[in-house]
Image (spheres, rainbow, N blue to C red):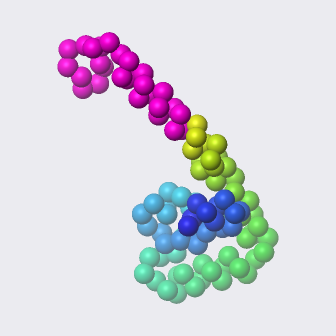
Amino acid sequence: MVVEAMAAGVPAVAAGHGAFVALVEDGVAGLLHRPGDPASLAACLRRVTADPDRNQRMGRAARRRYEQDFSPAVGLERLVEEYRTSIAARTQPRGTETMGGSK
């Protein structure tokens, strides 16, 4: 749901662990709360809703992050590059593998 919020230009409020830490830059594109701490979650929700200007700034930053890292165009570009890499590896002549291959 974090990436979906970013796509919508909405700052996410997420638990500060796991992949969320890599997805949400705390205070920039959303807020991270202490996992398992309802008071921390409530404080983040109050913080994100109390200041409409900050909310909009974080929302714009979230949308920029989405466009840079998660948009369909970026996903397609990465997928095509993976295909190119795989095809190139399969078309190498036998015995010319460079990483972990045997000669």
87, 12: nearer the viewer: 87
The residue that appears at 29% across and 24% down in the rendered structure is 99
Q: Is residue 20 left or right of residue 9?
A: left
Q: Quadrant of residue 18?
A: bottom left
In the rendered image of this protein, does residue 95 appear above or below residue 68?
above
| 89 lies above or below 5 | above
Decide if residue 51 is on the left or right side of residue 18: right
Q: Residue at x 50, y 57 (%)?
A: 22
Q: 77 above or below 36?
A: above
What's drawn in magenta, residue-wise? 78-103
Tell me which residue sits at (53%, 71%) in the image.
Answer: 14
Residue 15: x and y in percent read 49, 72
The N terminus - image quarter: bottom right
Q: Is residue 38 visible?
A: yes
Measured as percent of width and height from the top left, residue 81 is found at 51, 32
* Residue 26 is covered by the magenta coloring: no
